[in-house]
Image: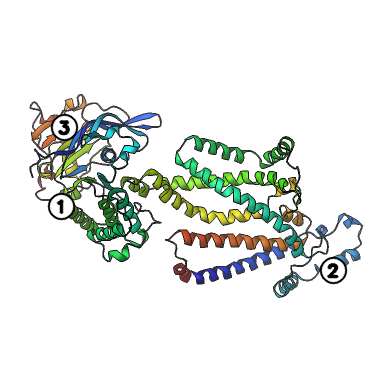
Amino acid sequence: MDHTNQEALVSIKDLNVKFKLRGKRLHAIRNISLDILRGESLAIVGESGSGKSVLMKNLIGLLDKNGEIESGAIYYGGKDLGQFKEKDWQGFRGREVAMVMQDPMTSLNPLKRIGWQICEALRYNQDMRGEQAKRKAVELLSDVGIQEPERRYKQYPHEFSGGMRQRVVIAMAMACNPRLLICDEPTTALDVTIQAQILNLLRDLRNKYDLTMVYITHDLGVVANVADRIAVMYAGDIVEIGTCNEVFFSPRHPYTWALLSSLPQLGVKKEDLFSIKGTPPNLFQGIRGDGFAARNPLPLAIDFLHRPPYFEISPTHKARTWLLDQRAPKLEPPEQIESIKEI
Amino acid sequence: MFLYIIKRILRSFLSLFLIICIVFVLLRQMPIEGYFPSNYDRLTELELNNILRNLGLLDPVLVQLFNFLKQLFTEFDFGRSIRYLQGRPVIEIIASKAPISFRFGMIAIFFSMPLGMSLGVMMSRKKSGAWDKIGTGYIVLLQAMPAAIYFVLIQLYGSSLLGLPLLYNPEVPRSLILPIFTMCLPNIAFYALWMRRYMVDEINKDYIKLARAKGVPNTTIFFQHVFRNAVVPMTNTIPTAILMTIVGGIIIESLYSIPGTGGLLVDVIRRQDNPMVQGLVIVYSSLGILGLLLGDILMAFVDPRIKLHKKGDQR
């Protein structure tokens, strides 16, 4: 797919998000710019605390109360979501952007029938009520692969298994008829066989409804299956972004290397699984230079002094590392990732 | 459901039976001096034995227990008071006092439950908002201050400044105002505290976030999801709370000379009026057990996850 001349649905410009925590300020998003293209499937990967969920919560106005956008803008159809007040979000959430959350066991109200919960979404986003809403809800349940939707419609969440509940959550998101669907670790709480089913379902729905999707995940296996583009986040910053093939087969940032090295590979016998040493930097303090330098096995001197700019490798591929500077020594990526031939 | 309730009731009777037996046997271990008025020292051995024999206290404990139970189950006879109101049937004494406490309790609940729960809801709407601060201040004040102090203050200032009757008088309805107001204060705090807590528990759950993400307006979320779900744990505490109120407040009833059952149990235990103690224990235990049972049954009505008939078979 050619991504260069696709129109951006969401355009994030120089976004800085900070959280107030016990009198200190935590810099969770450090000057991120990102376009989410219409119709694409973008995966945001990174370890816990890298800011991937925080970044996406801005798109739906669900940032925790102690967080605020310090500077920058998020454009969606000409409007800046950063300036939205609570009443502006009404009619935007759901209709434009919907969300699937991580844990299906807790994301449904345990005391309401699932039919009621889907109808609630239909009512506020598509103005459907009564019989019409019911028919649509049953249709959606059958769309997400739930057998006997008529009977299931009347049941409560506790009568569903984890995978089935996630299907219901997805049906609920689809009931909003959104343009952008954010899937926040949609398969993390599910077992492996169910994961594949859910990912297939999401891919089918994307084609059927022409959705733009954003996957937030730390599971590179998920990414490989569903994403067109991958953004790698580290310490509140996007360190590398490119198409799926570019990031998997010619990664440039040492953090991406490390991340890919720690991917377990089937059929490859090695002593130990690679793990990244150290911990992510403290976001309460300002970060000098490259955030990953301290954990990088082969850092450059300049990594500790100046923050690297983005270097463009191709029109779709860029990375924030001094290794791409002309004066930098030519470092080969670690051999583990050389063995990644197919995904 | 029906079967489950029958089973629960049968089990409740078993608990009640055990409670009666234990209390009965324990009461017989009390020192015998307690059965006599102040003239204990001046009575001869013979006179002492006569009195004890008349009270039926010289038989072996198990024989006494058997006789008591036989009377209780065949004739519904709780015995007669031996010290409190000598010779009057226990059931008569309780029946003359309980309705008064019951009426006070019910009126107090009628006001305090809706008020307290609304206060709790208002408090939970905005964390550290005005309502939350006022409510927290109110609850902390009531919890921190010894109840007797503000009870007395309300009685004194209520009667002197507002001209309300100082004591309870069944003929004057206005005399109900002060004791009921006093009774409501801690109850409102109780309901507000728990309601707020359960509301806050729900607000922080994932499905609330998802409901917001699917575009449901905040007010709707607040009532249809948060409030509805916070009611579930609340229903479990309500029956017991109601029963506790009905049993009567010791301090309030004595302050306003209300002839209710508040403080009666302590009184009869001190005077070693065994039949009275047994009677009250039966009444209070039944109420307590009933409260728990009601709480569980109500839960099954408000929470679809609880299916009593299914679980009943396994228990």
Secondary structure of the residue carrying tag 1 is helix
Circle 1 chain: A
Relative side of A342 to B179, left or right: left
Q: Quadrant of residue A229?
A: top left
- Look at 74% across and 64% down and name the residue there: B91
Q: Which amino acid does label 2 sit on?
A: Asn
As measured in the structure, the alpha-carbon distance from the residue carrying label 3 to the one carrying label 2 is 100 Å
**Residue B147: horizontal and vertical position, in percent?**
66, 42
Looking at the image, residue A233 lies above or below residue B240:
above
Label of residue B54 in the image: 2
Looking at the image, residue B191 lies above or below residue B16:
above
Label of residue B222 in the image: none
- Of A240 and A267, which appears nearest the observer? A240
Secondary structure of the residue carrying tag 2 is helix
Q: Name the residue under label 3.
A: A320
Foreground: disc 1 or disc 2: 1
Relative side of A153 to A237, left or right: right
Q: Which amino acid does label 3 sit on?
A: Arg
